[in-house]
Image (spheres, rainbow, N blue to C red):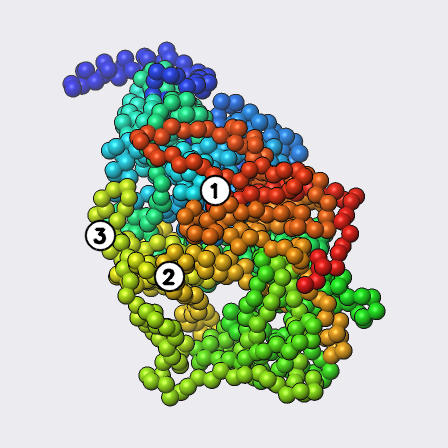
Amino acid sequence: MTMATAAVLFAVLLAAITVAESEYIDYNTTHKIIADKINVHLVPHSHDDVGWLKTVDQYYVGSNNSIRGACVQNVLDSVISALLEDKNRKFIYVEMAFFQRWWRQQSKAKKTKVKELVDSGQLEFINGGMCMHDEATPHYIDLIDQTTLGHQFIKEEFGKTPRVGWQIDPFGHSAVQAYLLGAELGFDSLFFARIDYQDRAKRLKQKTLEVVWRGSRSLGSSSQIFTGIFPRHYDPPDGFTFEINDVSPPIQDDILLFDYNVQERVNDFVSAALAQANVTRTNHIMWTMGTDFRYQYANSWFRQMDKFIHYVNQDGRVNALYSTPSIYTDAKYAANEQWPLKIDDFFPYADHANAYWTGYFTSRPALKGYVRVLSGYYQAARQLEFFKGRNESGPNTDALADALAIAQHHDAVSGTERQHVAADYAKRLSIGYAEAEELVASALAFLVNRRLSSHEGNPVSDFQQCPLLNISYCPPSEATLPNQKILVIVVYNPLAWKRNEVVQIPVSTREVFVQDSTGKEIESQLLPLSNATMSIRKQYVKAYIGKSLGEELKYWLAFPVSVPPLGFSTYILSRPERTGRSSTISMVCRSEGSVNNSVEVGQGNLKLLYSADEGKLTHYVNSRNLIRDFRTDWDLQVNQPIAGNYYPVNLGLYVQDSSTELSVLVDRSVGGSSLVDGQIELMLHRRLIHDDARGVGEALNETVCIVDNCEGLTIQGKLYLRIDPIGEGAKWRRTVGQELYSPLLLAFTEQDEDKGLHFKKSTFSGIDSSYSLPNNTALLTLQEFEKGKVLLRLAHLYEIEEDKDYSVKASVELKKLFPNKKISKVTEMSLSANQERTEMEKNKLVWKVGGSIEKPKVVRGGPVDPAELVVELAPMEIRTFFIFFDLLQTVPEVENHWVM
């Protein structure tokens, strides 16, 4: 270009700029779905981890920003302001743990405006649990509880029921999510991002990223949900992220400024939309406009989306609109398409070759164990809270409920968080436990005292519990009983069937004598502690209480107990000389001269060999086979034969051949596999010396420090093994699995010796003494919602065809569950109790499934007759009810309702 030409061009441009005027542009964001165009649903969202690199509260208030500049409070403040500016803008929010924190800080005027945004559909709650939970390592009851907590908050404050599941970030997905935390919640759809990279590649080619996912073989088509997998991650296509420091070029539409680029950016948008449309069925595609902790300055996003909607729709090649997953789901349903069927898990997950996300099945085993123990304790505490009567001003279970809910986050119990964040989860659990422990103690005292007549002395008030029994530490049972004193042990059973088990408590002397509540002597044993147990006890008690113990513990005292359903029995420990008879306690001794210093346990095909010194299982002998290196949805290319064959194990696993089953149950979530025929492999404890480069920025190397000395964390897990003829193992797995999750709860009180007579009638059952639940049925939830209103969940424990005796319908008699109360009404609810079941079923979308799919008849329990009050349960069915009591009419208390 010559100097003369350049001068002329500059003059023309200068003239154009001189005559042009910059003016306000009224962006048209009113666009809706257009039937004959590709519709690009822009879904503004922020993925806000309930703890990860920072704690939940640090993320909320924006502290500790040297780690990550994230402030959820800013996100919500900014988003609400941006939504109020334009009624066409939309936003979805997911994590109620954060929203609750923000909500309680708002003025009445602000709350009114936010409720208007929710009512108009501009702000929509998606998923609606307290967190976006993990799907590999939590217990399913915890998933139900944390979701219920969030859904009840939304219902109470806004009168809304979430329609869509939004599990965009968990590291693999379980079929339980599809049916239990999807269809059973009344969700119409479920969306997520993470699947195996090989699986995603195949689905992109075949346009099968969106499927109907049937999560339960037992519940068939009633367990299915429309499921969408994002084509890349949960962020927008490249070039369309607009946080204030993002690098995507904005639309520059002011002709008075340089770099005017409207058509260029419209072309980029259309190109990305067409690329996604080519891998998606129907003419609807979703862009997830956001990612982690975005919208801290919401106008930065909304300004650009306003412009794109305006200019893209002027261009006319595709249609862009503000949307939500609910709107997108309705559009997909209206397309009347047939969808592929998915029937199993999305585990294990790898995001590229040699990168399987299976180690976290075992990460932070102490936290996993703590969550599992407190989950079972929470269920028992809620029951006792109901039996005593809830007291809003006194100790209750709320803090533990909140702590457990947050702990189900996919960077919490999963073990994928930083160390200081793991400590924060544990601290919250500890605080919640302390309040629940106080409640449990007071409830047990209340129930014991109501069994004692007024002339039997002062009421019991000082029950103690032993949360450190896992490290063989229990001060009330180890204490030397003073003269004229006894130790009363109350054993509470949270299950709704009678239990006969063996209880073990640490004692410091062999001079002990055990009686039941009738005064009958109980046969007992003293068990020696292994060297490994003594070492763990010594170190960890010092770490916990800050000082060394005095005398060393000598024995475990083991004795059988029999406990009624939803009730307790009492047992008395005393010195034998005080009873006027000699002790009949037996001793179990370790033979130091055994061959190879090992102990062999078991008969037949399975033999377990233990190290006598360390108490460790050294190896076992068996000869069984198991089918690996396989995926149902694609031909697997095996890059990691070990990591790629590990699966999450929550309850247990088993292997079988043509005649026999070997079952193993676990005490916490672990990783498991069968890498060699005839073997089961379980990983209890995972430590790393180096960071795994997955964003945490520190090694998973947990330690325990005493003063200045830090050593690697020691975990002592428990495995439960059994061999059965083929087809018979399910009975043991299901029954013992429930007992492991809901162990007997022990409480101790030291009393005067003559007070022991007062406890002879201290056996309590909260249900009719002649009744217990069927062997294939469990009571999952018994929770007082408000006075005269109780939340009840019942579950069938067996799959169809799992067991020849128990894979059948079961019945539960509500009158016998509540023998001393007059039931006035029973209302069946959705799983999270936020809508009536009949309404949920009436509004459910029925999706078409492609191909010749077998459609077995779905069997479910029928409606509850208001006179008979009997609940039917089909295999794998969980039913949720609100039970209303007539407070003016109480059935007279009958002695045999309360005493065995």
**Could you give the CA–CA distance between mark 1 and mark 3, rounded to whole angstroms?**
32 Å
Residue at which label 3 appears: 639
Question: Considering the image in quadrants, where does the N terminus appear?
Answer: top left
Give the residue drawn at x 37%, y 88%: 593
**Could you give the CA–CA distance between mark 3 and mark 2, rounded to whole angstroms?**
36 Å
Under mark 2, the amino acid is Pro
Within 10 Å of disc 3 (Cα), the crowding (few <14, some 14-19, many 20+) is some
Task: Please identify the quarter of the rendering in which residue 189 is found.
Answer: top left
Name above or below for residue 884 compared with residue 655.
Answer: above
- Please tell me whether mark 3 or mark 2 is closer to you in this view: 2
**Going from the N terminus, do you reach mark 1 or mark 3 first?**
1
Give the residue drawn at x 57%, y 83%: 585
- Assign a secondary structure to mark 3: loop
Which of 403 and 632 lies nearest the eye of the viewer?
632
Residue 181's disc is 1
Within 10 Å of disc 2 (Cα), the crowding (few <14, some 14-19, many 20+) is few
In this rendering, would 152 be left or right of 414?
Answer: right
How many numbered dots are placed on residues in this image? 3
